[in-house]
Amino acid sequence: MPYLCFDIGSSSLKAALVSETGGLLGLARRPVALSHGKAGAHEADAAGWIEAAFAAGAEAVGLARSASKGSAGRPELRALSVSGNGPTLLVADEYGEPLGPASSWLDRRALTEAEEVSALVGKTIDPTFYLPKALRLWRAADADLRDRMRWFFSCPEYLLYKLCGVAVTYLPHPGYEPYIWSEGALDALGLPKERFPPFAAPGIEAGKLADEAAERLGVAPGAPVVTGFPDFLAAIVGSASVEVGIACDRAGTSEAINLCADRPFPSRALLSLPHPVDGLWNVSGGVSTAGAAFEWLAPIMGRADVTDLLAEARLSPPGARGLVFLPYLAGERAPIWDAARRAAFVGLSMEQGRPEIARAVCESLAYGLKLASDLAIGDGMPFDLLRVSGQAAGDDFLCALKADVLGVPVEAPVIGDCELVGDAAACALCLGDAASLRESAASLVRIRRRFEPRRAEAYERAFSAYKAAIEALASVDAKR
């Protein structure tokens, strides 16, 4: 068997068997829990990730074996790799058990710590990032809990540890160190360096698949367990958004354009981080509560799930008859950078009903992406093509909507969960199946359908109203 790949999302964990040519041999999902509390608390069940991973992994292996009518006995994998949402952070003890819930990537409680870290490293470090969270958890712990703390992990690193017993911290590029942690910062903040696993680049063999993990997955032990990426970088690689002007749209609980550029954006309005391909940059911005907005709205609308909600949205004409939705259900990151922002329907009237409400929420996500892409284009950055990652890649309505609003072609890959293909690319690089991430991405990614943009004046009017509503409600949100 080829590569077994895992991706830990906010609402589900995916496991897939991916062939050396990018074919999907088996795919399984399991739900994972994310809770929302007071004062910006957003927490995940770290132990649940592990149970979900072994269940989904075993199912994916079983599906692949059934399809291929494999021989008896536990099959051998070529390699395994893990990606996951970052910067979700947890603390584990010496036995690898979590010491409380993980702080999700949405968690913004480390505001004070973020200011302290930002001043120390000379960069703007958001409260959602790794080091402010680690600092908050360490300072809040009593002496007994501190003694029990052994490792700070992000979610993919924790699953990798459970697979092979080796502790690492993913470092996609040296330029990410200030956004994760560094020895100098740990020393200055009084944090014990031995609690933070050593850095490892993507595509490196961390260890071998342990006997117990292999038994739970139903495969032979000993396969290489390969370092992967934070999920957004895995999706970039797994959508082959590795040439200047191509952007990956990561559509999940959150959603962002990740534009491949030859330079960083000149201001903080868009987040600029090193691209997985050396010498390039990832310029990004979007909507923090994108898929989360669908999940919030579906039960309110009396719809069983997001699929039913999207069917409702299709009944409304473009522009939602003048209704605009601001999708800021939990504050916003780039390009707005305002934790106080809140969601709102603007322009609601007797003419509108459920279809228009559903349509306005769908359109709002495309408008949020356009806010970011317009900034990049305005600075002279090429934006020629968008590739969609996530379950939205399988929805032609959403893909066509984004093409029309953004004014660029949109491509939907065959494997919409591009993070899994990014993991496969890391495996290919590690095993020497490809000479570079760019080469492995190009060889693994297949396109299901391309959507050409069509001009729609209704979207242009609605986007103007959307921007005006953001500006008009800023003072209202600030007074809450």
Image (tube, rainbow, N blue to C red):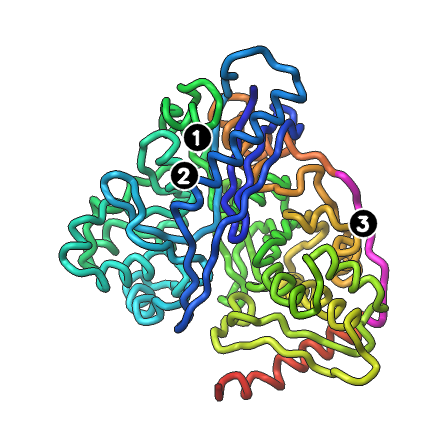
Q: Judge left or right: residue 217 versus residue 101.
A: right
Separation of disc 1 and disc 3 at Cα?
35 Å
The crowd level at tag 1 (other Cα within 10 Å; few <14, some 14-19, many 20+) is: many
Nearest the eye: 37 or 262? 37
Looking at this view, name the residue that lies furthest to the left.
143
Q: Are marks 1 and 3 in contact (CB under 8 Å)?
A: no
Residue 102 coordinates in the image, percent (x, y): 37, 54
**Residue 443 visible here:** no
Question: Picture quarter containing residue 329?
Answer: bottom right
Residue to which mark 3 is pinned:
451
For mark 3, give the secondary structure: strand
Was residue 452 drawn as part of the magenta stretch in this picture?
yes
Q: Earlier in the sequence, mark 3 or mark 2?
A: 2
According to the image, label 2 marks what residue?
159
Q: Is residue 378 left or right of residue 122?
A: right
Residue 438, percent from left and from top: 58, 35
Distance between the alpha carbons at the discs numbered 1 and 2 = 12 Å
User: Circle 1 sits on which residue?
Assistant: 226
- Mark 1 belongs to which amino acid? Val
Position in image of residue 441 (x %, y %): 60, 34
Q: Which secondary structure, mark 1?
A: strand
Label 3: how many Cα within 10 Å (few below 14, some 14–19, many 20+): some
Residue 69 shows in the view: yes
Q: Which residues are magenta?
A: 448-458
Query: What's the amino acid at mark 2?
Result: Leu
Q: Residue at x 36, y 37 (%)?
A: 200
Identify residue type, mark 3.
Phe
